[in-house]
Image (cartoon, grey):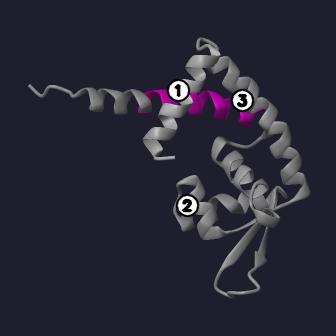
């Protein structure tokens, strides 16, 4: 019989809790704003980028997707008017993605929903526990 290490137990718990939290946030964002958590994170990265523009490959890295996966995800976002694609003035091979005014509005509204949903999900933790938890998560990522 294989004995599970504490590290494996923690990793599995992180995965299960991530799935639980992601599902709750996905449901909130989807039912109210018509976007999922990954689309929200795309908008988040664009809003915080210089000139609100990122190369497609950088956007893919920032949301943990492949370039082709992000390309597929951007098609409906472009049709909804949340983002637009631009040609790179420096590199004809690179495609740039820019958030639109509509995308910014959706992002700002969705941020309120994300904040409310997150507070509900983490309401069992006090401020000190939230700070500790956040610091530990950043430590895992090496931030």
Q: Which mark is residue 61?
A: 2
Mark-to-mark CA distance, 3 and 2: 25 Å
Q: Residue at x 62, y 27 (%)?
A: 24
Above or below 73: residue 39: above
Q: Quadrant of the N terminus?
A: top left
Task: Give the mark nearer the N terminus: 1 vs 2.
Answer: 2
Numbered circle sitting on residue 28: 3
Magenta residues span 15-32
Q: Please, what secondary structure does the residue beneath circle 2 have?
A: helix
Q: CA distance from mark 1 to mark 3?
A: 23 Å
* Residue placed under numbered mark 1 in the picture: 133
Q: Nearer the viewer, residue 65 or 11?
A: 11
> Secondary structure beneath disc 1?
helix
Q: Residue at x 57, y 28 (%)?
A: 21
| Label 3 CA crowd tier, 10 Å (few <14, some 14–19, many 20+) | many
- The location of residue 36, given as percent across then percent down, is 68, 42
Q: Is residue 63 above or below residue 66?
A: above
Q: Tell me, for residue 100, which label it has, or none.
A: none
């Amino acid at each position: 019989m294989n004995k599970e290490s504490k590290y494996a137990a923690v990793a599995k718990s992180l995965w299960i809790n991530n799935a639980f939290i992601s599902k709750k946030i996905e449901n909130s964002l989807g039912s109210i704003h018509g976007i999922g958590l990954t689309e929200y994170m795309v908008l988040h990265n664009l809003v915080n980028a210089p000139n609100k523009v990122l190369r497609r490959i950088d956007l893919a890295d920032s949301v943990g997707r492949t370039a082709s996966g992000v390309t597929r995800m951007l098609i409906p976002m472009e049709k909804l008017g949340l983002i637009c694609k631009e040609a790179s003035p420096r590199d004809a091979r690179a495609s740039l993605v820019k958030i639109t005014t509509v995308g910014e509005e959706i992002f700002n509204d969705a941020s309120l929903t994300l904040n409310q949903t997150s507070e509900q999900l983490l309401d069992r933790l006090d401020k000190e526990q939230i700070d500790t938890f956040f610091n530990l998560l950043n430590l895992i990522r090496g931030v």
